[in-house]
Image (cartoon, rainbow, N blue to C red):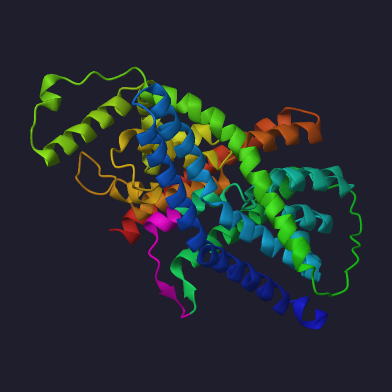
Amino acid sequence: MDNVLTHRVGGPFIFVLVLLIMSQSIFSWATPFMDIIDMIFIEFGAFIGSSLPNGMLNNLLVDGVIAGLGGVVIFLPQIIFLFLFIYFLEGTGYMARAAFVMDGFMTMVGLHGRSVVPLMSGFACAVPGIMATRTIENWRDRLITIMILPFMACSARLPVYAVMIAAFVPNKQFMGFLTLQGVVFFGLYLFGIVMAIGSAAVMKRIFPMGKPTPFLMELPSYKLPNIRLIVIQSLERGKIFVSEAGKIIVAISIILWFLASYPIYEPTVSDRATTDANEQQLSDQMISTLQLNQSYAGTFGQLIEPVIEPLGFDWKIGIGLLTSFAAREVMVGTLNIIYSIEETDQQLGLIDRLKSEIDPNTGLPKYTLATTLSLMIFFAIAMQCMSTLAIVKRETNSWKWPLVMFGYMTILAYFSSWLTYEFANAFLLG
């Protein structure tokens, strides 16, 4: 088996194929469970909204807390399936072979073979991956590994990728057994690996060469993994995802709900002067939109909109980019809260709300495939994680390297996102 799985040519091909199957399965298998969770939160929000009297508490619970939590918890099945795959590959002994196969690429770009294990850990979370770089003796190799590790597609990015792909990438068959959504999702994982390797090649020329050290690794024997243990570990990771993200989301949801709900917009007589039911619904929608636009969040979002408009983003996405700095997955909860406050039809999920968003200036859909690709590229590159910067500061014992990381990744993300948006508009949609 090692003659095949660790082959110089066949080994990397098999590793890429494993990632492709994993990406496709995450999308296909998790969808039914996600639909159930989405419906539960919609019905629960409707129940709370109808049970409590109209007022601040009702709006806070329905449009703030429930909408924020529901926007993130819906992706729990995908998180669990991701870790099922990771723990399964580790349990069989294949993950060590993947690290061995990638060692050749790491050496070509000037990294140590020990960088492979931390980088592979980055698929789950960058924080333990950065801590795992302690096994790299050479400071230069360790620093480069730390600086490129956030490019690996961590589980916190998954909710953002999932909602944008589900909303705007057609669910068409691709090559018979694959779907276009799964291929795009796999492409984002592959893109993170390419960005990490490319950045390492550049940093190799910037940082001085240290004394090379040999890379020794024992390959474990092949074995059938303990399925019960894998399931328990994956569920535990899902529990951590909900508990850790939940605490952040509840806090941000309350703050964001207040900023998006105040000051209260007072409708004029003409806003309400209609007897037709359909016109009344449109009037209510207009009032909700005016409330959001004139709120503290809307005012601040429109202030920063000119900066992100070249990327195809509006002020709502801009607010999401700011809140996601606390945790990347908060981006989805933020959008869910904003659209819950604006949207009068509470039976719609976030994906349907994004699809139905209309640009008032053109009358065309607000979010296009170009916007989707631009946002995903931005999230694939940008340093949108406060915890990662904190752990980098601790591991390097300096604020210099976290600031350098934040700066170069943000600039690179901005220009890459801008190029993606312009290219998509010119060639894909033109």
Q: Residue 296: x and y, percent?
A: 38, 21
Q: What stretch is highlighted in magenta?
A: 164-176
Is residue 203 or residue 197 the one in the foreground?
A: 197
6 in relation to 128, above or below? below
Horizontal side of 59 relative to 189 (left or right) equals left
Q: Residue 64: x and y, percent?
A: 45, 32
Q: Residue 342: x and y, percent?
A: 31, 34
Horizontal side of 14 relative to 43 (left or right) equals right
Determine the residue positioned at 76% across, 82% down: 4
Is residue 134 in the magenta section? no
Determine the residue positioned at 80% across, 82% down: 1
Q: Total marks drawn?
A: 0
Horizontal side of 115 relative to 60 (left or right) equals right
Is residue 190 or residue 93 the one in the foreground?
A: 93
Quarter placement of the C terminus: bottom left
Viewer can see residue 312: yes
29 in relation to 130, above or below? below
Is residue 167 in the magenta section? yes
Q: In which quarter of the image is residue 340?
A: top left
Is residue 112 or residue 339 the one in the foreground?
A: 339
